[in-house]
Amino acid sequence: MPGYFRDLHLDQIVAAVTVGREHYDLAPFFHAPLHDPATIRYRQDIFRDLEREPLFRCVRGFAEGMQTMRERLDSARTLHEHYQKQRLFLDAVATYCATLNAFQSALAAAELRAQGWLALRRFLAEYLASAAFIALQRETRECEQALDGIHYCLLIKGDRITVRRYNAEADYGADIERTFARFRHGAGKDHLVEFSDVLPMNHIEGAVLERVAKLFPDVFGALDAYCTRNAEFLEPTIAAFDREVQFYLGYLEYMRTFRRAGLAFCYPEIAASAKDVRSIRGYDLALAARLVAEKVEVVRNDFHLNGPERIFVVSGPNQGGKTTFARTFGQMHHLASLGCPVPGTEARLFLFDRLFTHFEREEDLATLRGKLEDELVRVRTILDQATPNSIIILNEMLTSTTLHDAILLGRRIMERIVALDLLCVCVTFLVELASLGPSTVSLVSTVDPDNPARRTFRIVRAPADGLSHAVAIARKHGLTQPEILERIPS
């Protein structure tokens, strides 16, 4: 997992996307940003096609069929009765064949544009027409028919059970029903006993199955040979697709939660060199998930950098959405680098080589460093590793020193960032950092003009004066200088 995941709450997003899909091990897909614009567009096209409901249902049906197949294989591995294991294996292969046939038919009728889906359709048609798959399907059907054709009798006397072939004996149950049918008055009480399908078999059932196998050695011998011959029946490309498509299904299902709440997603334009970035009505996915569950409005914000602009310096009152904005910027860039749709109605994002975050940490006594020293060491490590194609997100740095020293150190850090010409979001109380030159853009978190204690969580382009919020609060409580002087006796 990349080091910035927890700072940006991307770990929470991935956990939500992959819940219920743990056995697919999808986290590695989300941990590996792509660095090729063509590959990102390839994934975006797959997402676009999959958003269409007919294809989505078709692929989900395939995934459910493959899941049933795996459950049967897993159940077979836990059993002890040899022939019961083999029957479950046979059922798993039959499910596999039926699933692929249904999937191929649905894909053949689907409207596909993405190269990935078109290639899969061609591959699946070729595989299902191959001699290997045709033979697998034929052998599976023959084994099922042979097993279904077995009839046998159980003679139970005391504690002894005799198993023998069925020899066209009369069905006495049917005779009894015909005899007593004339006395029937309405529906009677059902006294039929249902046999349990619970696995595994008990010792009596196992013993009966062994004796049935001895009565029909040809059928069960063929089943033995079938299981040995087809032990590796699962085609590797199908198996890989079955896992990888869960990355797309999981993310699209996650998106639907937000869309039902009226929140938009878009396919961002990816810039590999130009650093003009923008987002319209973007939002923090991790925070939005909680707010949607609580039926609370999600505040969305815009941002853009043009020309020489590279650095957002975000200031304003505490708890005003500054850190959320920084997380949104990082989340969107990471998700875009995976080829995923991102929150908002429109976006143009930069294809970074590395993403770094510096969020406040609790002091670690094991390092024998003070908080300020630890901060400076961490920032220095980031700046040594960053390139002009990197993104850095700094959140409330240098809070553990004096204002004078914080401004001095903050300027030095910002000068290094400007020199590297990389993209940066800097959340800070040091308003002096917002006007270091054409590279910096001042953003301010706003409050309700009529109620300064109420945050709007809107982040806007505005000069960072650090005064307006304090003045508004003072005015609300009657503590401006003129009001105080009025109350002081002369």
Image (tube, helix red, strand yellow):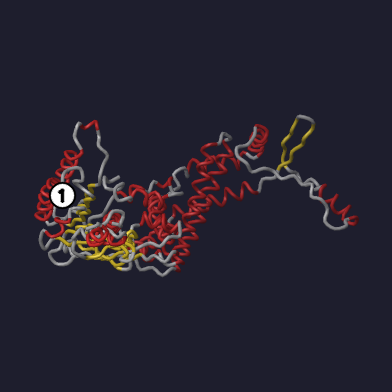
Q: Residue at image x 81%, y 48%? A: 173
Q: Position of residue 241 (x, y in %)?
A: 39, 54
User: Dividing the image into 4 quarters, which one contains the C terminus?
Assistant: bottom left
Q: 386 or 52: which is nearer to us?
A: 386
Residue most extreme to the top: 159
Residue most extreme to the front: 490
Q: Position of residue 266 (x, y in %)?
A: 33, 66
Would residue 185 appear left or right of 149 to someone viewing this image? right
Q: Is residue 279 above or below residue 166?
A: below
Q: Is residue 393 above or below residue 372?
A: below
Residue 357 in sight from this viewpoint: yes
Q: 32 or 291: which is nearer to us?
A: 291
Numbered-mark total: 1
| Secondary structure category for the residue under label 1 | loop
Q: 202 or 482: which is nearer to us?
A: 482
The residue pinned by badge 1 equals 386
Q: Position of residue 55 (x, y in %)?
A: 44, 65
Q: Position of residue 115 (x, y in %)?
A: 32, 64
Q: Is residue 5 above or below residue 130?
A: above
Q: Amino acid at mark 1?
A: Ala
Residue 39 in sight from this viewpoint: no
Would residue 152 appear left or right of 170 to someone viewing this image? left
User: Dividing the image into 4 quarters, which one contains the N terminus?
Assistant: top left
- Number of residues whose C-alpha sits closer than 10 Å to that of mark 1, classed few (under 14), some (14–19) or many (20 or more): some
Q: Residue at image x 38%, y 54%? A: 247
